[in-house]
Image (cartoon, coloured by chain):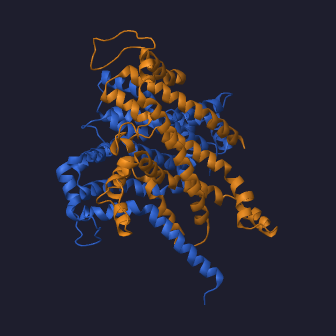
Chain colours: A orange, B blue
Amino acid sequence: MLLLWSVLPLIVTLWFSLRRYNLMNPSRTGFDGLGNYRYLLSDPGLGLAVWNTVLLLGSVLVITISLGTLIAILLDQEFYGRGFARVLMLAPFFVMPTVSALLWKNMMMHPDNGFLAFLMRSVGLQPIDWFAVAPLTSIIIIVSWEWLPFAVLTLLTAIQSLDAERKEAARMDGAGPIAMFRYIVWPHLGRAVAATTMIETIFILGIFAEIYVTSSGGPGFASTNLSFLIYRYVLMEYDIGGAAVAGLLAIVLANVLAFFLLRSFARNLDT
Amino acid sequence: MITPSTSRKLLLTLLGWSVALVIAFPVIWMVLTSLKSETEAISRVPHLFTHVSLNNYVAVQEQAKYLRFAWNSVVVSFGSTLLALLLGIPAAYAMAFMPTRRTRGTLLWMLSTKMMPSVGVLVPVYLLFRDTGLLDTRTGLLLVDALGILPVVIWMLYTFFKEVPREVLEAGRMDGAGPLREVYNLLLPLSMPGIVSTSLLAVILTWNEAFWSLTLTTSRAAPLTAFIASFSSPEGLFYAKLSAASTMAIAPILVLGWASQKQLVRGLTFGAVK
């Protein structure tokens, strides 16, 4: 029953992917074989969208996990007002995606009155129009900002679960801070890093709102990912057939990644 | 008297606070902007405080009917959380206390469905909604959101239920409690903290859910995520009002999120990191 529930939409998608189906043009129906596939594969936006999806995911993962580890180590130290600093740092994670995207677009990255433009002018630089010059980079920055707190919190939780005795024993054996991190802390973090990677992958593969309210995937296809490409097909061109093919592609991509991630996750589950 | 260890602590305090402030800066800036007038908000050189007022908050409600969208958000996020709990509690109960050979596989398979980007099923869901008249209704959005968080809810409840000693439930069964009484009188009270943090996480995730809100609603059922997105059109750009609306949209979740930060990691990592 559960299986049917989850597989049915997939079969429907598969079926539509083989048909001519445009909501704006209902007279044109029928079986089209692989026509949609041929059409989609010749769409110049597709390759770029796949590449953007992968690039977005990869960059955000690298940025959040590396910065997250550093910040988690910092937060593991004793200092005044640590609890409040942690709470403050957590804020971006709870901000809804449409708010954070508009906030960055209008108040941070805007070339005239954005705060970053103000900073650049005050050190004598020419402010840059982020979304025109580097649309995908801008989106990577926004998404990294949203997910950094999650990485910090997960890694911090993991660091704090490391027993003090093991750290003490390593220190007795003369391990410096770097050796300590390399041989004691980092191996312990493996599980947290795997979990963070998996969760971020789940959410970042489907990033949509951030693109929708900022660059609308442009200029051209420069910041279009697969999610946004499919949205374009369905709700802007009403091309159900084309969207279904792209949807299948998104599922295949997700499954390839999921296969590797879930395997490592399942291994962790038993220990 | 400054010893090396206090100066180290002071240095760490400085560093820790700077990092925290940089990360939280956009949010702080937004709150500050919401208190300014529109002309100050778009000036090239940022003003700090000239005349602080709450006018923008009033204006957002009067001109844009903020509360209507907020109500949609409340109905959808609390409704879908409730529905997911109703479906998730029996499922997690069965998996935690009557595991079969396939339980582990089912759990991992549920997780794998979350791997699939929502957009992969946009076409069938959109057509289904169009044909059943669920497009732009709160019921429709509520249903989709509930299904979307169901795997997270079941996983989280499962890890909490696992910690309830089996003996207690068995003792209850000996005393003649049926499965319903067993769940209602024993399991639920014993795992209340877990259920509360599961609900909190579910409310946070559904409150912030944007994909389905943007694709399946237009005006009547639009929640806050979609309402804020409507500010992205060039003619609707009023920074101070946008900031006021955004501040109101994130404030309740920020409070809930901070309150539940301890359980958040566990919930979002499906119990892998505690």
Please identify the residue farthest to the left as the structure is shown. B63
Whether residue A190 is visible here, answered yes or no, is: yes
Please identify the residue farthest to the right as the structure is shown. A173
Q: Is residue B135 above or below residue B223?
A: above
Question: In the drawing, does residue A208 fall left or right of residue B55?
Answer: right
Name the image quarter holding residue A227: top left
Q: Is residue B247 above or below residue B218?
A: below
Whether residue B134 is visible here, answered yes or no, is: no
Q: Position of residue A90 (x, y in %)?
A: 48, 58
Please identify the residue farthest to the top as the structure is shown. A30
Q: Position of residue A217 (x, y in %)?
A: 37, 39
Along the line of sight, the residue nearer the viewer: B243 or A113: A113
- How many numbered discs sit on the rendered protein? 0
Looking at the rendering, in which quadrant would you find the C terminus of chain A? top right
Q: Position of residue A49 (x, y in %)?
A: 45, 34
Q: Position of residue A22 (x, y in %)?
A: 32, 19
Which residue is at a point 35% across and 43% down the rendered structure image? A215
Along the line of sight, the residue nearer the viewer: B19 or A122: A122
Name the image quarter holding residue A112: bottom left
Q: Is residue B43 above or below residue A129?
A: below
